[in-house]
Image (cartoon, rainbow, N blue to C red):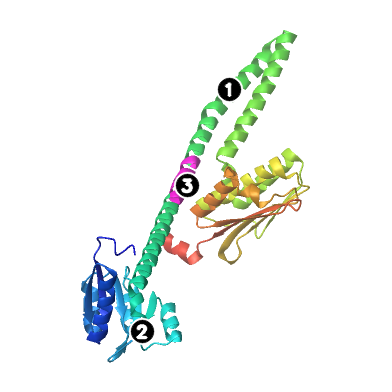
């Protein structure tokens, strides 16, 4: 047995009112070569005192003791955050009672008539206990890692939006202003020139400059759309109109009201979700139409972008480099929401964003503070 060959000395607490039965258990452990310190206690008060003040690797307990049962002892042990495994060692317990005890969290049970198997039961119980502790530790570490990744994703999204806003301001203030000034100068040259060739070149240059100005405005709008200042409904309507104009795909927006009041961070997440969904549709879906729905009913903002295009199977969504969809899911989490994607090949795709909205009372209280 692995434990017998180990240098580890186990601390075992034995809840037993019979010295003879305790000696039988101790003899079985000595015979196996198990290195242990085997301590007996026979009252509930003393047992609780030892559990509160000492460290034990495993607890063995008779089921029926004077004035209490092993389940009373287990109730005290179970409330400890890192309690040792608890094994029933009894001659007065039926199988049904033993099963009920294990449902409550007791690790195992052994009849006193089968005391020679005690070392094996201890070894197996400790092995299972260590495996469970390792699993719980791994789950806790994974949860911490996921939380850190979520915090990093939120930080990156915030940084990206700040950088987009900075770039949009530079385009508007520097590039846009410079292009407009050059266009006026070129137009002036064209008006004051008497050379037809010069006038033709000036007109062509003015047209190109106008195209560049329009491109810079479009880029600026995509980076940090000022349309959001007019509200989420107006912003999504502007996205839908622009999408229909560029692609020729009929795009319809339905909203629960003309204005939907949302916090700025939620508004931006909803806008980016609609923007990314429409971009994916234009690249992959080949639909005949697109329907967008916005609602703030029952205290939840819901945005659905649905198409009747090619659709996709689950393997596409699970691809390691499907960053667009994963990015939308991370965006939703940053505001306490979630993203659902429903799609089947040949039956279109539906992207649904749901974000709980703060209640009016909560918002008013926050503003007052």
Residue 240 spot, x, y in % from top left: 69, 46
Task: Report, in whole angstroms, how far the alpha carbon at label 2 lies from the one at label 1.
Answer: 100 Å
Q: Residue furthest top?
A: 195
Distance of label 3 from label 1 (alpha carbons): 40 Å
Q: Report which residue position mark 3 lands on.
A: 153
Q: Nearer the viewer, residue 26 or 205?
A: 26
Query: On screen, 106 above or below 355?
Result: below
Frontmost residue, 200 versus 66? 66
* Label whose residue precedes the other's in the sequence (3 or 1): 3
Residue 181: give its label.
Answer: 1
Q: Earlier in the sequence, mark 2 or mark 1?
A: 2
Figure check: 354 above or below 321 = below
Q: What is the number of the mark on residue 189?
A: none
Residue at position x 46%, y 48% from top?
154
Q: How many marks?
A: 3
For label 1, the crowd category at 10 Å Cα-Cα, with few meaning under 14, some 14 to 19 and many 20 or more, is few
**Disc 3 to disc 2, how far (Cα)?**
60 Å
Q: Residues within 10 Å of mark 3 (few under 14, many from 20)?
A: some
The spot of residue 349 in percent (x, y) is: 70, 52
Residue 240 drawn in magenta: no
Q: Are marks 3 and 1 in contact (CB under 8 Å)?
A: no
- Asked whether the viewer can see residue 337, the reply is yes
Where the N terminus falls, by quadrant?
A: bottom left
- Mark seen at residue 113: 2
Task: Please tell me whether residue 117 is drawn above or below residue 362 in the rendered image.
Answer: below
Q: Residue at x 70, y 13 (%)?
A: 201
Name the mark nearer the viewer: 3 or 2.
Answer: 2
Instruction: Give the magenta range.
Output: 149-161
Q: Residues within 10 Å of mark 2 (few under 14, many from 20)?
A: few
Q: Are marks 3 and 2 in contact (CB under 8 Å)?
A: no
């Amino acid at each position: 047995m692995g434990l017998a060959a180990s240098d580890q000395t186990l601390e075992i607490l034995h809840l037993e009112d019979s010295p003879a039965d305790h000696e039988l258990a101790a003899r079985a452990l000595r015979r196996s070569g198990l290195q242990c310190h085997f301590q007996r206690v026979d009252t509930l008060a003393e047992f609780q005192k030892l559990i509160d003040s000492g460290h034990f690797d495993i607890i063995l307990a008779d089921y029926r003791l004077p004035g209490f049962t092993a389940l009373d002892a287990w109730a005290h042990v179970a409330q400890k955050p890192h309690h040792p495994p608890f094994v029933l060692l009894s001659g007065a317990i039926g199988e049904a009672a033993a099963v009920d005890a294990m449902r409550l969290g007791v690790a195992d049970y052994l009849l006193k008539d089968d005391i020679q198997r005690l070392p094996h039961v201890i070894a197996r119980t400790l092995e299972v206990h260590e495996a469970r502790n390792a699993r719980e530790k791994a789950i806790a570490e994974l949860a911490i890692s996921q939380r850190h990744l979520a915090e990093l994703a939120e930080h990156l999204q915030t940084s990206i939006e700040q950088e987009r806003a900075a770039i949009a301001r530079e385009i508007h203030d520097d590039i846009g202003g410079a292009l407009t000034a050059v266009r006026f100068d070129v137009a002036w040259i064209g008006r004051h020139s008497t050379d037809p060739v010069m006038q033709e070149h000036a007109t062509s240059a003015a047209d190109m400059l106008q195209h560049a100005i329009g491109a810079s405005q479009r880029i600026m709008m995509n980076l940090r759309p000022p349309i959001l200042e007019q509200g989420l409904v107006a912003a999504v309507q502007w996205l839908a109109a622009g999408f229909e104009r560029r692609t020729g795909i009929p795009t319809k927006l339905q909203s629960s009201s003309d204005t939907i009041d949302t916090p700025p961070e939620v508004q931006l997440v909803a806008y980016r979700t609609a923007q990314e969904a429409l971009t994916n549709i234009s690249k992959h879906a080949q639909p005949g139409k697109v329907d967008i729905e916005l609602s703030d009913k029952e205290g939840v903002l819901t945005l659905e972008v649905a198409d009747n295009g090619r659709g996709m199977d689950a393997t596409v969504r699970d691809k390691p480099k499907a960053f667009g969809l994963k990015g939308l899911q991370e965006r939703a989490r940053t505001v306490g929401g979630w993203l659902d994607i429903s799609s089947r090949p040949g039956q279109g795709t539906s992207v649904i964003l749901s974000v709980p909205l703060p209640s009016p009372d909560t918002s008013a209280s926050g503003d007052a503070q």
